[in-house]
Image (cartoon, rainbow, N blue to C red):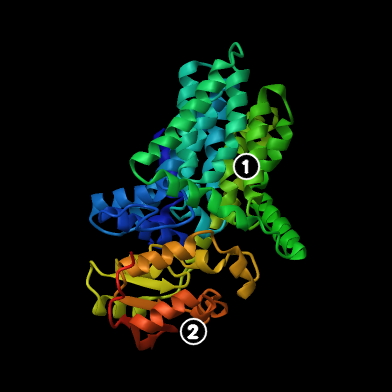
Amino acid sequence: MVLVVGAAIATHIPGLGRQLFDPDEAAIATMGNVVAHGGVLYRDAIDRKPPLAPLLYAMSFLVTGTRDLRPLHLLVALGVGGSALLLAAEARRIAGRRAGWWAAILLIVGAIATSPSAAQAANYSELALLPATGAIVAARRGTRGSAIVAGILLGLAILTRQTWILGLAPAMLAAWLTGDRRPSRPALLVAATAATLGAVAILVPFGAFFHWTFTANVHMLDLGDPTDLGRRAWASIGVFVLGHLAIVWLAMRRGFRRSDVDLWLWLASGVVSVGIGLRFFDHYWFQVLPPLCLLAALAIARTTQWERAVLVAVLAISASYCLQLASTTRSFTHDWSPVVSVIQADTRPGDRITVWGSVPELYWLSGRSPGGALVITDFVVGRTAGRADGPQRLADATPGALRTFRNSLYARPPKLFLDTSGGDIRSYQHYPMALVPPVAKFVDRYYREVGSTDGVTIYELDRSPPARG
């Protein structure tokens, strides 16, 4: 156990020495900071993601008294270690001690064999790994209690990354196939999953949670350019297979067996989750890793000593390259310190600011809460990563986002309004405020321009808008 957890921590050393690896971390940290100061998710800070990750961030901020992200990176490392131990226990139960060790090693290496922003960040996909792995293992144990535990863990995984809801079918199948095949176990699993999802209403408004997590994501299924879509899909598959060559080869060596049918279904659901939204980000592949690594470990008994030596070499090369990449890449985001200095000079900690754009780092670095509630304004203009930018994206705006944004601006007008569309900042030159007249009118009426820093035009509140009834 100590060796496995130690290896997981060692492979995440680059993340333990740095703060931000991915803008998504800044978005989660923004929501976590709002919660840590008494705010409510989906009311005071809104993103199109489940609540568990920002709640974990808030807990870390409260415990440490800082907005430091490194404790979250350690939490991810411990989660990988815990996931490796769970897979090891299941592999050892089925195929012996050697398979158990290989299951742990394959998951630890597989979790870092990707881009640094996916491997070292405390992101939704990474944080969902531990409860999801627990659900996969528990669902196969064949008791009523294990079915309930699997349902609770699957619910937690869904509350961290919503695409794990696709795991409901393989989890039910696993609960039914093991033991005496009574239908009560799948029913208990579903009930436990539903109860876990419903329990989130204790912490956040359930209707708003359901809207922003599930129904607000429908427009992301737009196909876009089919040629570009195919290129990105094959590139994503190729990069994953290349980085996980030993794991994929072993899983194929295992082949299809009736006893593994649930694992292959888990794997299929993971592949589907990668394609949902048709954006194919690296961290989406984390949903594939637990079943793939378990299948691969179960094949180790069929390999020769020479083959195992080659596999170890391939794993070592992959891990070494990815760790070096994560350690030597100097920056994963722009240096926003000039803009943050202006924000902190012109506002107090309790003041709100609004960023027109997709730069949640400004909220996290400055410690200010988002005026307008939305962590990014992509939801208002329809901007989605992996799609061509421009006014045509307005048709993909999240239903209700503009109303929510506008009402929040009027209810609690921010001290500063920062417009990133004047510079080449994450494609927002394609989304000037003029494209959304209610927002442009609000800024024109109640704010005055006070300057520009690092491509960001800064407006200061000139007079408060009237209360809206």
Residue 357, percent from left and from top: 47, 72
Residue 63 visible in the snapshot: yes
Q: Which corner quadrant holds the N terminus? A: top left
Q: Residue at x 58, y 33 (%)?
A: 168
Crowd tier of the residue under label 2, counting other residues whose Cα lies within 10 Å: few below 14, some 14–19, many 20 or above:
some
Residue 34, percent from left and from top: 31, 58
Residue 217, percent from left and from top: 56, 54
Q: Amino acid at mark 1?
A: Gly
Residue 142, percent from left and from top: 54, 17
Tag in front: 1 or 2: 2
* Residue that label 2 marks: 422
Which residue is nearer to you in this view: 465 or 244? 465
Which residue is nearer to you in this view: 254 or 145? 145
Which comes sooner in the sequence, label 1 or label 2? 1
* Residue that label 1 marks: 270
Which residue is nearer to you in this view: 312 or 329? 329
Q: Amino acid at mark 2?
A: Gly
Left or right side of 72 for 188? right
